[in-house]
């Protein structure tokens, strides 16, 4: 009997020891899990029909690398190029992004400019720049209209490096991978401008077709789709730059403009045109006999003009970066005049595979260029 009791006692002790060992092992595993450092890298995973599925992994928002723009040369079109290029490089290399307040202030007057989750504040930027205990290596590239394919390679911007963009960065190839995001989330209209521009279209419909459409102004893309789905008109935006181009012989000829208009008229029976220009009196006189051509009002700002033309299905552009962006944002067929010297080493660095009309008024694709 004593032997049985002794065995039971030893068995109970052994089971208690096993229980303690299990508790110790579980505690160790949990402790190890809790001490793991999760990283949040400043990039988005993009799916079709979904702009930003942000990663939730974070290491106290440590800045691994940074792309930044402090220069603010030129007008709106120039600023859009360097902003889009910086955004493209930051996305590609999973870096944070800093754009100077002078640039973002002008952009935000027109565009939503959603740069999250990459954008850092000026305060954070200054702390990083002035941090002598954990300094980052700075690299500066000044570019006009070259394309730098080496920047697309892995580790082109390394950890603990700051990459500064200077100049103009007027090759769309630096951000072509993210064109959809740029059109739908960066350079998309703010609500007040969308409402202002919608009134222009409503006035035209009332004047031309004698009815007043009701548009849903949920967002830029929604309004653009409604205009495209209308059976009343196929909208083609025209940008005419003249003021500073006439003395330089960069301005497009009337022949070019009418040839481009005739091209679209021959392809779309309901083609209607909206013109934005820095010389409205010239355009008003030029198109005075065309009942299907309308001008943006004198009260419109450059931001109002670019949003108006971006809402069109197709484009006719002359020279300059402003006109380039009207065509790029409209994202349809684009006829452009080759009289403008882009300044790029190769034409395809500046022009996507759009259309052009040459001096003989014949339509070609970019592949027909002689470089």
Image (cartoon, rainbow, N blue to C red):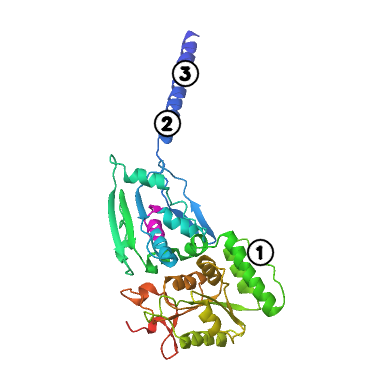
* Count of numbered labels shown in the rendering: 3
Please indicate, yes or no, whether residue 238 appears anywhere in the rendered image. no
- Return the disc, 2 or 1, that comes first in the chain's sequence: 2
Q: Position of residue 207 (x, y in %)?
A: 68, 77
- Return the disc, 1 or 3, that comes first in the chain's sequence: 3
Identified at 62% across, 84% down, the residue is: 291
Taking 266 as reference, is 206 left or right? right
368, 214: nearer the viewer: 214
Can you say which quadrant of the picture contains the C terminus? bottom left
Q: What residue did someone put label 3 on?
A: 11
Magenta-tinted stretch: 87-99
Q: In this rendering, is residue 66 above or below 262?
A: above
277, 367: nearer the viewer: 277
Find out whether the residues at labels 3 and 2 contact each other: C-beta distance under 8 Å.
no
Q: What residue did someone put label 1 on?
A: 216
Residue mark closest to the camera, 1 vs 3:
1
295, 164: nearer the viewer: 295
Quick one: label 2, few (<14), some, or many (20+) residues within 10 Å?
Answer: few
Q: What is the secondary structure assignment of the residue under circle 3? A: helix
Q: Residue furthest right?
A: 211
Quick one: label 3, few (<14), some, or many (20+) residues within 10 Å?
Answer: few
Q: Is residue 310 magenta?
A: no
Q: Position of residue 1 (x, y in %)?
A: 50, 9
Q: In this rendering, is residue 184 above or below 361?
A: above
Q: What is the secondary structure assignment of the residue under circle 2? A: helix
Q: What residue did someone put label 2 on?
A: 31
Q: In this rendering, is residue 147 above or below 371?
A: above
Identified at 59% across, 64% down, the residue is: 194
Residue mark closest to the camera, 3 vs 2:
2
C-alpha span from label 2 to label 1: 54 Å
Q: What is the secondary structure assignment of the residue under circle 1? A: loop
């Amino acid at each position: 009997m004593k032997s049985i009791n002794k065995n039971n006692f030893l068995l109970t002790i052994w089971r208690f020891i096993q229980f303690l060992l299990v508790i110790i092992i579980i505690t160790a595993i949990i402790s190890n899990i809790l001490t793991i450092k999760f990283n949040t890298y400043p990039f988005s995973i993009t799916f079709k029909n979904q702009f930003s599925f942000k990663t939730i992994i974070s290491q106290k928002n440590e800045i691994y690398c940074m792309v930044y723009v402090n220069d603010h040369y030129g007008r709106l079109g120039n600023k859009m190029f360097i902003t889009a290029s910086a955004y493209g490089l930051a996305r590609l290399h999973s870096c944070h992004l800093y754009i100077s307040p002078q640039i973002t202030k002008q952009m935000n007057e027109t565009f939503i400019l959603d740069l999250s989750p990459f954008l850092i504040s000026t305060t954070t930027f200054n702390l990083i720049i002035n941090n002598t205990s954990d300094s980052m290596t700075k690299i500066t590239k000044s570019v006009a209209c070259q394309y730098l394919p080496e920047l697309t390679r892995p580790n082109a911007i390394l950890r603990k490096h700051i990459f500064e963009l200077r100049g103009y960065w007027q090759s769309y190839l630096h951000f072509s991978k993210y064109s959809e995001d740029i059109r739908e989330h960066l350079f998309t209209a703010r609500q007040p401008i969308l409402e202002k521009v919608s009134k222009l279209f409503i006035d035209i419909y009332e004047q031309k077709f004698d009815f007043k459409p009701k548009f849903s102004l949920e967002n830029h893309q929604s309004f653009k789709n409604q205009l495209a789905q209308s059976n009343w008109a196929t909208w083609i935006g025209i940008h005419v730059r003249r003021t500073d181009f006439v003395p330089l012989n960069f301005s497009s000829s009337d022949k070019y403009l009418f040839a481009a208009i005739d091209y679209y008229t021959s392809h779309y029976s309901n083609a209607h045109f909206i013109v934005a220009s820095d010389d409205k009196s010239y355009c008003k006189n030029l198109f005075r006999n065309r009942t299907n051509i309308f001008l943006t009002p004198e009260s419109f700002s450059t931001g109002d003009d670019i949003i108006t033309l971006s809402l069109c299905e197709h484009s006719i552009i002359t020279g300059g970066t402003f006109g380039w962006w009207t065509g790029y944002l409209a994202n349809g067929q684009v006829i452009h005049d080759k009289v403008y010297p882009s300044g790029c080493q190769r034409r395809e660095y500046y022009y996507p595979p759009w259309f052009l009309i040459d001096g003989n008024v014949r339509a070609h694709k970019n592949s027909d260029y002689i470089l």
